[in-house]
Structure formats: structure tokens, C-alpha cells
Image (cartoon, coloured by chain):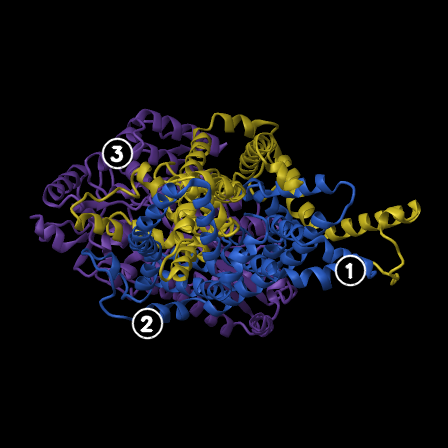
Chain colours: A yellow, B blue, C purple
Amino acid sequence: MTTTTARGRESAPAPTRPRAARRAARFKESLVGWGFTAPNLVLMTMFLFVPMVWALVLSFQDTQGFGDPEWVGAANYATLVSDPVFWRSLFNTLVFTAATVPIELAGGLGLAVLLNSVLPARGVFRTIIVLPMVISGVASGMIAVILFYESNGLINKVLVATGLDPVAWQSQGGPAMVSVVIAAIWLRIGFNMIIYLAGLQNISPEMYEAARIDGASRWQQFRSVTVPLVGPSTFFLLIMNVIASFQVFDLIFVMTGGGPGNATSVLGTYAYRNGFQIREQGYGAAIGIVILIITLIFTYIQWKTSRTRDLAE
Amino acid sequence: MANTTAMLEIAEAEILGDRKAASLRRRRRRRRSADRKGVVLRTIVAIVVAAIVVFPLYWMVVVAFSPRGEVFEPGLRLWPSTLTMENFEKVFDRVPVVAWFGNSVVIGLFVTALTVIVNLLAGYAFARLRFRGRNAVFLLVLSTMMIPVQAIMVAQFKLVTGLGVYGTYWGVILPASAAAFGIFLARQFFIGIPDEIVEAARIDGAGHLRIFLQVVLPLCKPLIAVLTLLTLMGSWNDFAWPLIALNDNELFTLPIGLLYLQNQTAPDYNAIMALALISVLPMVLLFLFFQRYFVQGFARSGIK
Amino acid sequence: MKLIKRTLGIVGVVTAGTLVLSGCAGFGGGGSEGDEQSLTFTTWGSEAEEVSFQELIDQFEAENEGAEIKLNVVPYDQMFSNIDAQLSSGNAPDLFRADYGNLGVYSSQGQLLDLSDAFSDDEASEFTPAMWEAVSYDGVPYGVPHQTDVSALLVNIPMLTEAGIDVASLPTSQDDAWTWEEFASVAGQLRAALPADEYPFVYNWQLNGAPRWLSWLFQADGTFLDGDTATIDSAEGARALDFTKSFFEKNWVPPTSSTKGTVYADALFTEGTAAMAFIGSFLVPDIDQLAGFEWTAIPMPKDERGATDLGGNALVATKDTKNPELAAEFLKFMVSADAMALFCGNTNELPTRIDLEGDAVEFKVRPDVMPVFVDQAATIEAEDVKQLTSPAMAAVNTALQDQLEAAFIGGQSTAETLENLSAAIEEAAN
């Protein structure tokens, strides 16, 4: 890529270099910079930006998946606005996100603090709790299907054995949503814990010592030292968790298929259903575009109100 | 640690006067006995949480080794009545497990190699090279992390079809490699590399590429390990996209294989769990091998 | 670091090995392009079906020197989105399996091979007229009726006996089939006798089975489509919907068994959660293997008339197949009397040929219950088939899934459900 001539020690540091040479060096650095980013930009353009534009085009068409598409103007969007299942799916996505993200954050931090303290067999506990992170959504979903199986699944059997009523995991909307939320948290809490552990290890013990001298209780130490100092981790995890929850697909596809009714239908499963199950690709693309717009608005708000800027500086 | 504590105690005594220091010492003693109680309590909590977390995995193993249909029979049973290999025999007999496993491996390795190389290069440029438009481009790249897969999957699918790679490995590999998360992680890590090291190499007259390859990368083993593991796991576990992009039974990856079994008439969940176990085992082993890099990699990547 | 190097070494060996094994076919090389004698056949299927397909393919290859049929079995969830995609990108399989509803979608869009030249009028008349009608569009055959499948009512004998129902008095043929009222009284009797977590029966309209609800509509002597007009919003439609809604209201069926349920009727039956189940004959081998109790089959209930669902599938060739002659040859072979008898016998499915009617097929599993299914199949009328195989059917299926789910467990009123269904059918048909 770049050929370099071995310069001697006498090449002085930058400020005293003649301007032309400096400009040449800067120009070269620019070239290298663009060269380094080119492979990624090519891939992203091909497989993200082009499809985005294409999705916009598709969303104005009525297309079956094969045969000739038909231009229908904004008809797909008109359908969408009055489509109760779409609104339900959007609502469910927000509910799912609101239910999973805080628990993942709080649980992840709690477990990280717990497993950062003095504890026998600490490493073993850490490993076990992070383990679900490597299990695929499909496999987890199928394990969950067996556990939450309403008529003869283990969870209901245990509930009955302890004298409680079985729960309608598969026939009532509320419990069904709870079951996918539980499965999602199980999958992701380990990742949250790992990131928080990394964050905790960067906090110097003196901070706690100082707080203790001030007579701070355990809880006060946690509030005033731990929580603020893992702030960057929290911010990073917040973004990662929201992305993951907003895009949830395989768990729900395998566990409930969006049912009962449309109680667990989320944007991901609904877009898939239209695009690939019932031959409404144009409509599926329109749903995709709306998801994209919502995401962009969300990102913009975050950008305006928080420290996303720090990430880019 | 002990030294600092002792010094602090002396300092405290000087600052606060003896009476307060004594009360502090008393409080510390109390805390030590409380600590012992605390350890017991924390251990109990940890055991409970770990048991809850590990139980579904235990259940997967139980179902995989149980006779067909047994777990769905009435009555509470927490382990198999007899250990049987019949589910594994059935899976190997019924479906091309070895081929599916191989497909997952090949696709996973290609995705990982491509993604990690591309991400390291881009992450380095965003972290340590100055060029016009750098921040704008980085923000653009960062914002792609926000793009939900389902927003563009219909169009991605049409694109892959148009490129003539639908139904091949490439149709799965290429779209998966356009991911931003690794770039973000790599950039954070590279920012943390001391300037002096790079500067010294520059003064020795090394070019950017050589610095990157010979000076910077050797310092980034935890980063490379984390990136490799995360990408490989992501690819290994990916479901939505292979489901859309693969159409030949012989080229399926393991997650699609699981769906294939679930789609059978009268799905045999014992066989499904046997295949699930086969599919999660490699990742579990890999993770156990390299887990120390995980915390290290994240801890040093500035995501604190 | 050594560990990493060693791992990399192992990884390299594994990759090289897999690449050699897979012959790099996965990277788009080594396809079956260009070989005139080699056709791809994509299908989904149960274990018994897969085995029988392979057996017949081997037989066909032995009879036709040089011909090669590559069997590709995919998950049902993926089947038609794949076919659509492959059709639009011009690399569709030469042959595939399609239910009669999806066949209508493809034939009406001109995607399938016209088989007029392959079948003389005499040969076409060897099939049940209704089934030949099912593979035809505008009078042109675009596939072969490979098998059909109907539902009947399976009963768990010990559970019925325990509830005080005399199993000796169960109906055995269409003549003495239960009326809806008799069926309802049996269900009520079972409900009273069974514990809360067990149910009188379960119906098989889950997921892609939603059109099976239409059996009730037909029994009430209703229709849902006349040319391109929706006819479902009628007194008959309301009667069928009210009756089926009462299954859920009266707790006769498990609440998880609605049209979008993820648990299938057969699973609820074999595990003993439901005492009776409406089940397609193709599931008989699975149930025989899984049910640990004595069970038998009886006819579906009837109202104004008897009716059942038109299950089963056609085999089709795509218009752009590389070798139309060989493809037609293969389809013809698959529906020859011997091949069909073997396939149906192995899979407990029903033939579509007139010369295989009655007891001509030797069913491998539970031949004692199969006459009930054969008998039940006779209740399908040409008018039903015409509606069930219209190109609108795929979209109607979707509408049925959504609307019935809303009616059964979402509390949607009968009037509104029929109105919505009517609108959706109307839209699909035009």
C-alpha cells in the first residue's frame, strides 16, 4: 500500500518540517485512512445502503415475490397506518424493550458487583452466568418451548406440584409476553454482567476506601461510587440492549410465532411474515422503512440528549 | 492494599483525633464479622442465580438423553428414567448433521475472517489516522448499528438474489460481514494504545501499514480474541438471514437444521434437543477456552 | 499464545477438510447447471414421505438410464418463500411439491410447465375429476395430483370409556356419523367428566391448517367464494363460526389450540391432553408410534352434509426447467398406479387415481382405521375443490388465520369476523 523510505533520525518532528512536506504527509495519511476504511465502506454500501434505498423503492410497489411488481404509490403506507396488527407489533416491541432492558442492566450490574466481591469459586459462577450468551436464539427458543409448554411443560408441572395454578403461557397474551421476556433476559444478562465486570475492574479500590472513611454505608458506596463510575458501561449496554430488543426475531419466531392472537407479534416477526410468509413483499418493505424511520428518530434523540458524541470524539 | 489501609488509619487518627479513630476501628471490626456473614449470604445468592441460569441448559441435556416423549408425560420428573442415545442416533440417521455442522464451520470462519480484518483496518483508521471526513464517516458507520435487520431484509434478499449468490455460502457470508459493532470496539481499543509507541515507529520511518501490522496488532491480542469470538458466535447462531438466504438442504447451517426438525409432523423434541446440544457444544467449549480474554478485551477497550 | 496457534492449526485443518468434503458447492460452484439429465426436486415432508420419495426416485433412475433426480427436503416454513425467490431469480428447482392452494398461485402467474401434452384425455380421466380439476387452471393441467389427505376424528378409547361413553356405539361410516348436536353432547359429556387440564377434543386448524375451518362451513352447506365474489358472510357462515367459537367458550378445546397456536393437535392428542382430535390421515404413523393408549378413527360430524378438508399435495414442474420432457416423465411416473400405491401405502395418505379407490392401497400402519378416511374423502364435492384450489387460496389462508384467531380468543364478534373475512377474500380474488 504505502512504500516508505527509511528516514534517519535527523528528520525532525513535524512542526519544523517545511509546509509542502507536511502537506504531502497529511495527504498520504488521508489516502491511507481512506484505504483502510474502503473495504468496510464497500461492504456497507453494498449490503446496507443500497438495500435501504431499494427498500424505499419496494415500499411503493405491490410485489408478490415473483412476477412483475406493480407501482402503487403510497398505498402500502396508507394500509399500514390503518393496520391494527402493525400498531400492535410496534407496541409489543416497545413493551418488550421496556421490560427487558432495565432488568438486563440492573441484573447485570448486580451480578457483576456480586461476582466481583470476595466469594468462593467466583470464576465458576461467572462462567455459568455468562454461558447462555453463547447459546443461539433458536436453541434457546426451543428449550423455552419445552419449559413453557402449557399442557405438560416443566414449569407448569412445578407450579402445580407446589400447589399453585398452572400459567397459560401459550394461550394468553400476557403470560406469553412474559415468557419471551424471561427467555431474552436469560440469554443476555451474562453479556451485561461481563461488560460491567470489565467496568468494575477499572475502578480503583481507593475510591471505596475514601467513601468508607466518610462513613458511607455499603448501599451509599454503591450509589455514589459504583453507579457513576460504570456510567460508560451503562451507556454502551443501554445502546446494545435496545438494539437487540428492538430487533428481536428468532426467540419469538420459535417460541410463539407472534401469538396467541398478535400478543407477541413484534416488528421483526411482522416484517418477516409479510416479506417472506404471505407474499406481501412491498408491504413488508414499507414496514421496514417505518422501522428505519423510528430507529433514526430514536438515534437522533439519543444523540441530542446524551453522550453519543463522546463515542465519536 | 494492606499498606495503604494502615497508612490511612494513621492518617485518620491524626486528622480525626483518637476518639473518632477508635470508633472507626470498632466499626471495622464489626464489619469484619459482618463480612463473614456477607460472604455466606452472597454465596447463597450466587448459587441460586447460577442454578436458575444453568437449569435450562441442564434441561436440554436431560431431554436429549431421555426416551422419546417422556418429558411430556404427566408427572414431575427432573431426570431421565433411562439414559438413551436413541435421539442422537435418530438425528444422525435422519438428517445430514455432519454436513450442517461443516456448513456452520465454513460460513462461520469466512464471516469471521472477513469481518475481523475489515473491522481492524477501519477501526484503526478511525482511531489513529487523520483524514478529512473521518468523524462524519465514523458516525455514519456507527449509525448502521442501529439499522434493524428486518428493516431491509426484503431488499437485501432481492440484492443477494440479483447478485446471483442466493442459496450459496456467499449469500450468507457477505451481508453478515457488513457489521459495525466490531469497528466500534476496535476503535475504542486502538485509542487506548499509547501514542509514544506509534510515534517511535514513525520516527524509525515505518509506514502506516507496517506500524499497524507489526507494532499495533501484536499489542491487540485481547481485542482480536474478543472480536473473533463475538463474530464467530454471531455467525454460528445466526438464524433469520440463513433462513432467508439458503435453500439447499445440504447447505443448511445448524440453526436451520433445528427449524427443519421442528417443522416435521409431530416434531420430536428429544431429537431437537439432541441436535441443539450438538450445535451449542462447540461454542460453549470455545468460550470456556477463551473466556479470560473476554473481560480483558472489554476492560481495555475503553468500554468501562 | 501457543494455545491460539494450535487452535488456528486445528481450525485450518477442519476448514480444509470441510471444503474438500463439500466440494466447494456452497460457494456457488459445482451446481447441476448444464446437465440435461439431472433435475432438482424440492419438497418438504415427513420422515415416511422423505423415505418414500427417495425410494421412488431410485426406481425412476433405474428405469431411465442416465436420469438423475436430486431430492432437496427443506423446512416447511421456508418452502414457498424459497420457491418464490428462486422463480424470481430464474434458478428455480425443476420440480417441486405444492399444496393445491399454492399451486393456484403459481399456475395463475404462468410459472409452471403446461402438462397438456404429457397426458392424453384417457390418462387424465384416470384421476378423480375433482383432483384433476385441482391441478388445472383455465382447463390446462399444471401439475399432477400426487396424493390427497383428509381429516377424520381420532378418539382416545380409555378416556372416552372413563367418561362413560360407550365406544361400541361410536359411528363407523358416513351414514351414522354424528350430527353437530350429537357431537356437541358428547363433548359436553366429556367436559363434565374430565379434569380441568384435559379437554374433550382438539381441532387441527393451527398455523397452516386454518383452511380446515372451512370443513365446518361446508358441513353447514355454506361457501366462501363464487367466481370472484366472497360468499362467506351468510347465515351458513355465521352458523359455522358460532359453533366453532363455542368450542373455546365452552372449554371443549385446549386454549392453546387456536389457529395461531404453536402446539399441534396431534401432540395434544398423543400426550393425553385431548380425548379426541381431528387429524389428517398422514399423521397416523406418527400417532401410532407416540400414543401409548388404544385409539381409533371415526367420521367427522355432519350438519346439512358431510365434509372434510382437502389436504394433500400436487407435484409440479417449473416452466423454465432445463429438461421439460424428463420432468414430465418423472411427474407421470410419480402418479402411476404402482408408485402412488407405494407412496400412499407408506405414508397413510390417500390416492387420487380412480383405480386405487376403495381398498386398493395397502396401508402399512393401522390399516384398520384407514377405511374411515377413505370413506370420509368421498364427502369432498367438486364445488369445494373449486374454491379450495383458487389462486386466491393462499391469501384466504392468511385471512382465516388472523380472523379466526381474533374470533376464537380475541373476542371478536361473529358479524365482524365474517365481514373482515369477506373483505379479505374479495380482495384476494380480484
Q: Quadrant of the C terminus of chain A?
A: top right
- Foreground label between 1 and 3: 1
Question: Count the marks: how many?
Answer: 3
Dot 3: few (<14), some (14–19), or many (≥20) neighbours within 10 Å?
some
At label 2, the amino acid type is Met
Give the residue number, with chain letter if any, for mark 1.
B201
**Residue beneath the point at 81% across and 59% down:** B207
The percent position of residue B111, horizontal first and vertical second, equals 60, 58
Q: Is A27 on the left or on the right of B137, as rendered?
A: right
Secondary structure at numbered mark 1:
helix
Q: Which is nearer the eye, A30 or C252?
A: A30
- Label 2, label 1: how far apart the Cα atoms are: 59 Å
Counting from the top left corner in percent of width and height, residue C362 is at 29, 65
Chain hosting mark 1 = B
Instruction: Tell me how far mark 2 sits from mark 3, CA to CA.
Output: 44 Å
Q: Determine if residue C118 is in view.
A: no
A234 and B101: which one is in front? A234
- What residue is pinned by disc 3? C245
Q: Looking at the image, do the residues carrying marks 2 and 1 touch, with CB atoms under 8 Å apart?
A: no
**How many angstroms separate mark 1 from mark 3 (CA)?**
78 Å
Q: What residue does disc 2 label?
A: B85
| Residue C182 seen | yes
Left or right, C254 with reference to B144: left
**Chain letter, disc 2 residue:** B
